[in-house]
Amino acid sequence: MAHSKSALKRWRQNEAHRARNRPVRSAARTAVKKAHTAIAAGDTEAEAAVREAASILDRASKGNVVHKNAVARHKSRMMRQLNRADAAAEAPAAPKRARKTAAPKAATKPKAAAKPKTAAKAKAPAKARATKAKS
C-alpha cells in the first residue's frame, strides 16, 4: 500500500486508468483474433474484419492504451497475412517453373605453378634485458 498522499493518489489514478483501458485493450485483442481467424478460414469478410481491427487498434493507440509501434506492427502483420491469402486464392493453379539445368562450365585456364617460397631469414638473437637487482 502507498505510504504518502501523492503515492496514494497515484495508485487511485492508476486503478481508474486501468479500469478505463481494459475494455479497449480487450476489444482490440478480440478484433485482431477475429481478423486472423477470418483470414485463415479464407472468409470473404476477411478484408472487412481486418479493416475493423485496424480501426479499433488505431483508436486504442490514439488513447495511449496500446503503443503506436505495437499497433503498427499488428496492422502490418494482418495486412501481410491478408495479402498472402488473397495472392494464394487468385493463383492456385500456377505451374511451377522448371529448373534450369546447369550449363557446363567453360574451360578455365590451367593455374600457374605455385612459386617456391623464399627461405625465411634467420633472426638475430634477442638482446638480454636489464633486470632489477633483488635486495
Image: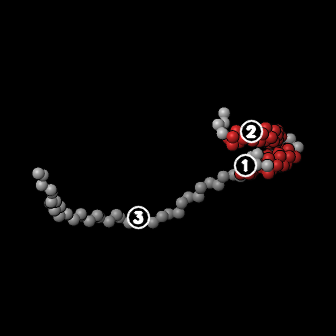
On the image, the x and y values in percent for residue 115 come to 32, 65
Q: Are marks 1 and 3 in contact (CB under 8 Å)?
A: no
Identified at 56% across, 58% down, the residue is: 104
Determine which of the numbered discs, if any, sits on residue 85 in the image.
none
Nearest the eye: 124 or 2: 2
Mark 2 crowd level (few <14, some 14–19, many ≥20, 10 Å Cα): few
Circle 3 SS class? loop
Q: What amino acid is found at the position of numbered circle 3 in the picture?
A: Lys
Task: For residue 105, say whether it is visible.
Answer: yes
Q: Quadrant of residue 128?
A: bottom left
Do we see residue 125 in this rendering? no
- Give the CA distance from mark 1 to mark 3: 62 Å
Q: Which of 115/33 is in front?
A: 33
Q: Amino acid type of disc 1?
A: His
Q: Give percent across and percent down for residue 76.
A: 75, 51
Whether 36 is drawn above or below 117: the answer is: above
Q: Is tag 2's residue or tag 1's residue first in the polypeptide sequence?
A: 2
Specify whether 10 is left or right of 104. Answer: right
- The Cα atoms of the two marked residues, 2 and 1, are separated by 22 Å
Q: Which residue matches tag 3? A: 111
Res. 12 mark: 2
Query: Of the residues shown, which amino acid type is indicated by label 2?
Result: Arg
Q: Quadrant of the N terminus?
A: top right
SS state under label 1:
loop
User: Closer to the N terminus: mark 1 or mark 3?
Assistant: 1
Residue at 72%, 49% (x, y): give it: 67
Contact flag, marks 2 and 1 (Cβ < 8 Å): no
Q: CA distance from mark 2 to mark 3?
A: 82 Å
Task: Report the mark closest to the observer, 2 or 3.
Answer: 2
Q: Which residue is mark 1?
A: 67
Task: Check disc 2 and report its element: helix, strand or loop.
Answer: helix
